[in-house]
Structures are given as C-alpha cells and as structure tokens.
Amino acid sequence: MESSKSLAAWQKSQQFIPGGVNSPVRNFSKVGRHPRFIERGEGSKIYDIDGNEYIDYVASWGPLVLGHAYPSVIEAIRSTAVNGTSFGAPTPRETELAETLVTAVPSIEQVRLVNSGTEATMSAIRVARGYTGRDKILKIDGCYHGHVDYLLAKAGSGVATFGLSDSGGVPEDFARNTLTVPFNNPDAVREAIEANSDEIACLILEPIMGNMGIIPPREGYLNQLREITEEHGIVLIFDEVITGFRVAYGGAQSYYNVTPDMTCLGKIIGGGLPVGAYGGKRDIMRCVAPEGDVYQAGTLSGNPLAVTAGIATLKRLAEPGVYEHLENSAAALAEGLAEATQKHGIDAWHSRVGSMLMLYFTPESVTDADGARTADTERFQHYFWGLIERGVSVAPSQFEAGFVSLVHSEEDINNTVQAATQALANL
Ligand code: HOZ
C-alpha cells in the first residue's frame, strides 16, 4: 500500500509539532510505522493523502455517529458560518442545544456548554467540590476523563497506550486528593469512602469504560454506586463524553436506568466540532458563576458552529429506528469478528455495548482495567496493520474503542469481517 505522501507529511509535522500530532495516540508509535494523513471523509469512509480508502471505525474517536460529512450537519455549519463564527455573546441556538440535552439526558436539569470533554470533567469536579465543600475525589482505575492534572492518575486512553502510570508535569500535591479504585467493584468504593469519611466530593466514572477498550458495568454495579454515594452525600458524576447519545439517545444512564447527580458530555453533541458540556441537578448547577461562586468561563463556549452541528446531529439521532439500526449493524460486525477469531483459534475477548465495540487479544475475561492490561498489544499491532492494508481503519491502540456509525452499510460490515478474517489468519 502506497504511503509515501503520509510519511513525508509526518516527517515534516514532527519538526513543528511534538510527535507530529496534536493528540498522542494519533502518532501510531505504539503500532510501529507512521500515521496516515487524512485528506477527506465521506459517509463511512476516509481517504488518506496517498489516495487510499478505508472503512472508518475511529469516527474521530467517537463524535461521528452519523459518519463523515453528513449532509444535514454540513449544511447547518455552512449556513451558520456565513452569519459569523463567534460573538462572545449568547445566541438562541445555545439554548436550543441546552434544552435538547436537558430533555434527553435524565440527570441534566441545567447545563453549561464548554469546548471539550476535558473542560467538562474539570468543571464538573470543581462544581462538585464547591457544592460539597470537600476536596477529595474518587475515580476508577482505567477511566479516562481528559488531560486534567489530577485525573491523569491511572488513566486509560493514551496514558494506557503508552504504558504510563501517570503524567509528568503534575505536582504530587495536585494528585494528592485523587483516590483510585477498580471498576466493577462496589466494595472497593465503599472501603475508600469509609476510609475518607466526609472528605470525598465526588465519584467520577465512565459508566461504560471506553478508554481501556470497552468494559461494560456488571449488572447492578451502577445502582450500587448510586446508593453508596447518596448515603454519603457524594456527588455521582457520569462521564458520558463517549457514551452520551452513543449507546442510547439519553446515554448510558438511560440505557442502564441509573441517574447520576451530574453528567459530562462532548464528542457527539458537537457533531464533529469542538464541544463539551456539563450539567446536573439544578441545586448543584446553581453553584456555577455568575449564579454561584464556582468560576468557569470560555471565549468560544457555545460556539455557533459547534452548537449548530450538534443540534443537526441530535435531530437526526432523535428520529425513530436510529439506535436499532446502530445496534443491528454493530451486532453483525461483532458476530462476524467473533466467528473469525474462533475460526483461527485465536484467544480473544469480544466486548460490545450498542455501537461501541472492542476485540481484546486475551484469553481472560475483561471486566476491569487489569483485565484489559492482559491483552497482547503486539498481536494487536499485527492485526491493526492487517486491517489497514485491507482498507479498514481502527484506532491505533488496543485500548481505544471502535465505533459503528449510522452510515456503515451491510457491504461495509461484510467487507470488514472479510478483512479481519484474513488479517487474523496471518497472526
Ligand atoms: N484520548 C482520545 C480518545 N479516547 C484521543 C483523541 C484523539 O487523539 O483525537
């Protein structure tokens, strides 16, 4: 497969950008060789600058649930842009998006729009601290909540991909108030709370882990967390940056019917433009300035283009049959992949919730971050290139999720299963 133009582009980008990329996992260093530079995307496909076509399951790391350049989203961006791209003043569209989020997501009574998932989690935690007057926070091993200093402890995503335990540049003091416990283990949460009674402001987690592959909650786990946190006056925050509008219109909280106190969103609600949001009970959101004393601000927050792309995306997702369609396409893909690993006698753990899916190269069952860490990343590397060479693009990491979009056709799914079967045969 020709990739000389991508190689040249990467050699040049490394002179000006650390690692040649603007987010670490994109640089492919954990799968060897160089990244592909992308020219354009359309529907289920992306095209690199050497002219290669790929069926895409990265979906810009989750936002593109409608696929690339979805016509109604592009038209909304185009018609908004001609009237100006930013005002630093409120616009009715921000309220429209906020109302849509409040209506869709059970825990959200009021919401603030920000520019990224990182900003959303950072702000939600500040609000939880302001609301409770407590400093400590509890997080889950392997959950990734963006690159906030004190949330990089035992984080997933790039931190796991690069095998880092934490991040440099974070003073020990900053992480002193972050406690970490394993996923799917309510007893560990209980013990941490008992050992730090009345000191924990919030428990933040991805209700479905999506940055150590895909790890669903065990039955009843989220309900147990809801009960424990309520008992101790701890704010329960669901980070639904990945799962919001992905596994169901109302996110994982409506999929599992467990309502947290606060929710963080991002990705899909911006339709492929930079956005984030945090919201929750009115009582808690009242703490946010200017109503309350917890400060949070942003020049581009509620940006007209991002908000318009988000509204257009959510409108399409609200139409009947969307989530059934996503479920059926992803189920067909997951079944095909499971048959393929079985056929070749490859130890694999397949994980899927709705249109998020993962194939781990491990004989273990993956129910927490330690389980995910047993995966054979070298084997993944060979599989990854086997797919790329056959025109299928997945994230260049054993720990990043795959996403099926509304526009993946039956033919795309069949071709992907065929490519995977061939790639697995050569492992
Ligand atoms: N950590 C992000 C996904 N879990 C990666 C985002 C990106 O590289 O674009």
Image: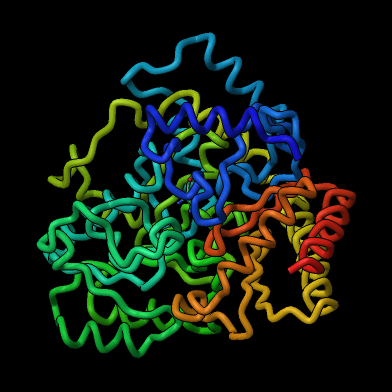
Q: Is residue 234 left or right of residue 381?
A: left
Q: Position of residue 256 (x, y in %)?
A: 56, 72
Q: Nearer the viewer, residue 119 or 308?
A: 119
How many callouts does the rendering have? 0
Residue under the image location 78 percent in, 52 percent down: 321
Query: Which one is in front, 112 or 73?
Result: 73
Residue at position x 15%, y 82% in the image: 197
In the image, residue 101 above or below residue 369: above
Vertical order, 388 against 135 (above or below)? above
Q: Is residue 236 visible?
A: no
Q: Residue at x 27, y 82 (%)?
A: 231
| In front of the other: 289 or 379 | 379
Q: Residue 103's x, y, as percent?
A: 52, 49
Q: Horizontally, is 135 left or right of 36 in the view?
A: left
Left or right, residue 363 beside residue 163: right
- Which quadrant does the N terminus fall into? top right
Image location of residue 184, percent across then percent down: 45, 82
Residue 37: tell me if it is visible.
Answer: yes
Q: Quadrant of residue 407?
A: top right
**Residue 319 pos. (x, y %):** 72, 45
Q: Nearer the viewer, residue 258 or 158?
A: 158
Quarter of the image for residue 358 reads: bottom right
Instruction: State the residue at coordinates (43%, 56%).
Output: 158
Quarter of the picture containing the C terminus is: bottom right
Q: Is residue 73 above or below residue 350?
A: above
Tell whether 109 sits left or right of 171. right
In this picture the colour scheme is rainbow
